[in-house]
Image (tube, grey):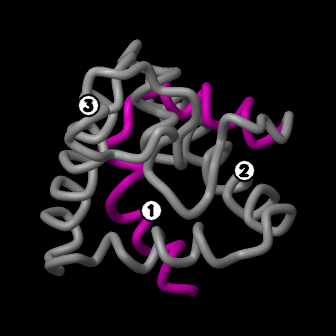
Amino acid sequence: MESWREVWRGGFAKVLPTAGLEALAKALRDDDTRLIQGSTTAPPPLMCVQDWPVEAACLLGFCGWQGAGLETVGEVEEFFAKACFDADQLLGEPAGCRWLLNWYDDTPRDRMRADLLGEVEATLAERAAAV
């Protein structure tokens, strides 16, 4: 299995909120331009814009922004950092989250959307079955 899938299944799929995953799935299906690659947020997560509203975000940031009601660059950056920390703890590998994040940023958008959507939908189906 590819490293990014292992990180998704063993880490992020367990720590991201269901509402965030639902928002992410919709964004992946619809090719929402607010779902960006190559940066955590737009505007970028710099100290001088921590209180600015988020206009776009990466897969993790999108889950916090659209799924958890976060609004500012600082809030979304904090959500991103916590998700990465929590995933790394579950994986038992410092910076293990990088395998997914690098894949996400470096994979052509159409392929990334299709592959990640399959993982997100599988995670949502597992959660629904467990209820």
The CA span between labels 2 and 1 is 13 Å
Mark nearer the viewer, 2 or 1: 2
- Residue picked out by circle 2: 117
Which part of the image, by quadrant, shows the C terminus? top left
Please state, as top left, top right, bottom left or bottom right, where the N terminus lies in the image: bottom right
Give the residue type that dot 3 points to. Gln
Report the amino acid beneath label 1. Arg
Q: Locate residue 35, reporting x and y percent.
A: 65, 42
Precedes in sequence: disc 1 or disc 3: 1
Horizontal side of 107 relative to 50 (left or right) equals right
Residue 72 relative to residue 60: left or right: left
The stretch of residues the image draws in magenta is 1-29
Vertical relation: 45 (above or below) 63: below
Q: Residues within 10 Å of mark 1 (few under 14, many from 20)?
A: some
List the residue tagged with mark 3. 50
Q: Which residue is mark 1?
A: 9
Q: Is residue 18 magenta?
A: yes
Q: Main secondary structure of the magenta part?
A: helix
